[in-house]
Amino acid sequence: MSNNDVVITGLGATTPLGGDVESTWDGLLSGASGIQPIQQDWVERFGLPVGIGASLAQEPTEVIPRVKARRMDRCEQVALIAARQAWADAGFTEPDDDETELPVDPQRLGVSIGTGIGGPVTLLDQDDLLEEHGIRKVSPLTVPMLMPNGPAAHVGIALKARAGVHSPASACASGAEGIATAYQMLQSGRADVVVAGGAEACIHPITLAGFAQARTVSTRNDAPGAASRPFDVDRDGFVLGEGAGTVILERAEDAKARGAKIYGYLSGYGITSDAYHITGNHPDGIGQIKAMEDAIQGAGLTAADVTHVNAHATSTVVGDVGESSAIRSAIGDHPVITAPKGALGHLVGGAGAVEAISTILALYHGVVPHTRNLEQLDPQIELDVVAGQPRKGTFPAAISNSFGFGGHNTALLFTAG
C-alpha cells in the first residue's frame, strides 16, 4: 500500500431499514423490508397507481431538534444525521461554536455529498402557500432549503469544513459520485479528511406520478414487502425510497497515525457517461462496462480479483438485464452478486452511498447479504446472485455500481483492510 491509499474510517446512515448503520446492516442480513404502504391521503386523492414507498425507519425529528429541523428540507436533515454518525464513528468530536476545539484543521476538511433531486418538496410546499395565501406566507428559507447543494452545505457548516464542499447531482449515481469526488480530493492533496456520500428524501405525489407515468415503479400495492424484486423473473419496477449514507475517507498513513479503525480501502473508481438517452442506458452497456473497467484498472487489479459486486439492480425489466450483461463483460460471471434495493427500495441520490456502505461491510465482515424477493432468477441474468440467505466467505475486492438517468455511471472499487 502506498502513502496515498484512501481508507474508510467512519460510516453513517439513516434508511428505511433503520436509523443507523448497525440496524440497516442487520436488516439486510435478516431479509427485512423497509417498504410499506404510503399513509398520506394524497395517494387516494390524486388516484396514484402506486401507493407504496420505502420511508425512513426513524423520523429525523427524533434526532434533530424540531426548531432546527423546520429550517431544513428533509433531504438536508438526513444528510446531516448520517454525516454526524460517520464523524463520531471515525472517532472525531463535533467542533464547538467558537471553534476552540477542532479535531481536524478546517482548511484540510472537505465534504462531498450528492443528491439526485434535492429539495423539491420544499419548493412545492412553498408554491402552494404562495398560491393560497400570497407572498407573506413564503418562508425566507425557501431557497436554502430547496437548493441541491443544501445537504452538503449543512454538513460543511456543522463540521467546519473549508477545503471545499461539493454536491454532485448525477441522478441515481450521485451518492457514489460523491464518494469518488472525495477520493479525488484526497489524492490531489486538497484535503486530509473528507465526509462523502449521498442523500435523498422525495417521496411526494409529483415524483411518484412522474415515475408511474414512465412505468418504472412497481404497483404491487397489495404486497409492499414483495414489490422490489431485483433480478427476479416477476419484477415490475422499483420502489421509491428515502435516506442517506456517508463515509469518512482519509489517507491510510494519517488514519493509522491516529490509531483509527479502518473498515477497508477505496482503491479505485470509474465515472463514465453513455451520451445515449436521458433515461435509458446504452443498449450495449458501454458506459457501465467502462466504469467497472476503469475502477479495476485504477486499483491496479484484474477482473479476476473482484469477488463481489453490489449491483445497482433497481428491479426494472430492462435495467437489470443490461447491468448483468455489463458485469459479465467487464468482470465475468464469478463474482458473488447482491442487490440491496429488494430490501431498501431505491434511495435515488442516497442509493450509491448506502450501498457502498453495504459493500464495505460485506468485505469487513466476510458476508454478503442476500437479495430479498429473489425467488426465481430471470434466465437472462447469468450471474451468481445471492438468494435465500447471506453468503459467507472471503471477499478481498468488491465493486459497487450506481447508474443514473442521463447516462451517468459510477463504479467504486473497495478492498479489504
Image: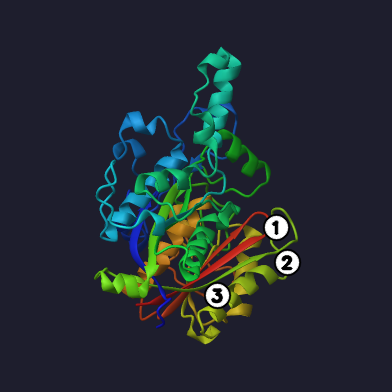
Mark closer to the observer (3, 1):
3
Quadrant of the drawing holding the C terminus? bottom left
Which amino acid type is marked by label 1?
Gly
Q: Give the CA separation, mark 2 to mark 1.
A: 8 Å
Which amino acid type is marked by label 3?
Ala
Task: Please give the name of the residue rendered at 67% of the width and 59% of the height, measured from the top-left corner.
Answer: 407
Crowdedness of circle 1 by 10 Å Cα count: few (<14), some, many (20+)? some
Residue 36 image offset from top left, x and y in percent = 43, 43
Crowdedness of circle 3 by 10 Å Cα count: few (<14), some, many (20+)? many
Mark 2 and mark 3 in contact? Answer it, CB < 8 Å.
no
The one of 355 and 228 positioned closer to us in this rendering? 355
Name the residue tied to disc 3.
295
Residue 316 image offset from top left, x and y in percent = 61, 57
Name the residue tied to disc 2.
283
Q: Can residue 68 be seen? A: yes
Residue 207 image offset from top left, x and y in percent = 59, 39
Q: Secondary structure at mark 1?
A: loop
Q: Secondary structure at mark 3?
A: helix
Residue 272 image offset from top left, x and y in percent = 64, 66
Q: Can residue 389 be seen? A: no
Mark 2 and mark 1 in contact? Answer it, CB < 8 Å.
yes
Mark closer to the observer (2, 3):
3
Residue 147's place in the image compared with 390, above or below, is above
